[in-house]
Amino acid sequence: MRIGISCYSTFGGSGVVATEVGKALAARGHEIHFFSPSVPPRLVGFEDRINFHEVRASPYPLFEDAPFSIALGSKIADVAEHHGLEIIHAHYAIPHAMAALLARMALGNNLKVVTTLHGTDITVVGSDPSYLSMVKMAIRESDGVTAVSEYLRQETIRLFGTERVIDVIGNFVEPPRKGCPECRGWLAPKAAFVLTHISNFRPVKRVMDVLKVFEQVRKEVPARLVMVGDGPDRLEAEAYCRERGFAAEVRFTGKQLDIDTVLACTDLFLLPSATESFGLAALEAMGHGVPVVASRVGGLPEVVRHGVDGYLESLGDVEAMAADVLTLLRDEPLRRAMGEAARERALGTFAEGPVVDQYEALYRRVLGYDEAEVGRPAGAEQHA
């Protein structure tokens, strides 16, 4: 199949998933075309059957803001026409699905559109009256719609009252790459434990809760905290560490491509978010055999099993989370058992192969492929 994938070029979960799905599809022989403002972080190296198309919205004096959606729709239409794209997989309803639908209108053909809902496009952007009608249209007019968790599927139905079929296709992780063996020595001198948090440092991630949990833990056991990522709450977080006198025990790394090395040195992962539609960062930690302590919100209970892979506590309950962390750090057999259970769940239930199988099946269904045929949709011979 010839597939276009439109996604954000950020370090967030949607960009990671979109990129990894595209790479896996290319490895299976499909022709993949990525559309994004810049190269997604996970799209590194030169690989066969993978093409990247940069989308730039040109400024114009009459425009208050450069119209990215129109530029994206125009780029999709151009590439689809000249490369014979059959389907566009849009990650996020706005602007990606809307731009794909706009491209289909411009082409006047039967270009198929599959939209994956990742969370904030429904729970934040979608519920904003300024965008509500457009999100509804994107969901209604897409040929296929998926959500990354059952929680998000139910939220979409509740917020938009849609009766259309929404397939739940979760995120996935690959077997972790080997990390740097020396990192443990400089991250945690004197055999201190390593706690890690990875996010975009937005208010919804509650990075201050991460610090408050760590503040309690460090008083009881030797520990270091690694804060991976960047965003609007980083300055406040760094200032808090300095004011409370434990800045030397917290390492703010900024954005990192080599997550494997960080997680390979981690004893426990913290994710006290206000909401998570899935929790890809938690799943990646689990893939490394790292137990997770997180909020019992959104789609996280579909990923982390309380008392098996880690612990889930009420939103904002810093004391309970700190107690969970201390329990795991003080009980090495328990921590190892939970870590192994987490690894088995991540690499089994959320393995790459079955998830990509689901996307392939959805594409074929949308394109009208004969189930007995691996090649083209009916009538493709005449089109060719």
Image: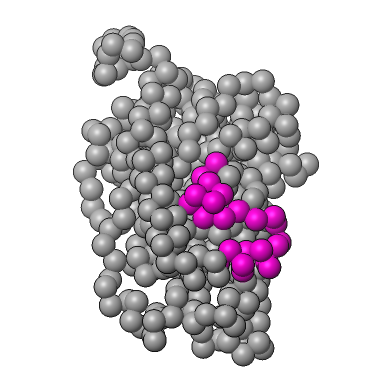
How many numbered markers are drawn? 0
Q: Position of residue 113 (x, y in %)?
A: 49, 28
Percent from the top left, x then y, of residue 288? 37, 57
Judged left or right of residue 175, residue 54 is right
Q: Position of residue 21 (x, y in %)?
A: 37, 41
**Where is the C terminus found, in terms of image quarters?**
top left
Residue drawn 48% across and 38% down?
Answer: 170
Q: Please name the residue shown 49% across and 71% down the image.
A: 330
Residue at image coords 73%, 34%:
159
**Residue 284 showing in the rendered view:** no
Question: Vertical placement of 304 versus 224: above or below?
Answer: above
> As rendered, which of 244 and 30 lies closer to the eye?
244
Please name whichever residue, 222 or 126, is drawn nearer the observer in this view of the structure: 222
Q: Is residue 312 magenta?
A: yes
Q: Quadrant of the N terminus?
A: top left
**Was residue 4 drawn as part of the magenta stretch in this picture?**
no
Location of residue 367 with respect to 265 vertically, above or below: above
The answer to whether residue 373 is visible is: yes
Q: Residue at x 58, y 34 (%)?
A: 150
In this view of the protein, which residue sits in the foreground, 358 or 102? 358
Residue 167 percent location from the top left of the image:
52, 27
Colouring method of the image: one colour
Question: Residue 155: which quarter of the image?
Answer: top right
* Magenta-colored span: 302-325
Looking at the image, the residue that sits furthest to the right is 129
Residue 208 figure quarter? bottom right
Tell me: residue 29, above or below residue 328.
above
Q: Report whether 47 appears left or right of 112.
A: left
* Depicted 75 relative to depicted 334: above or below: above
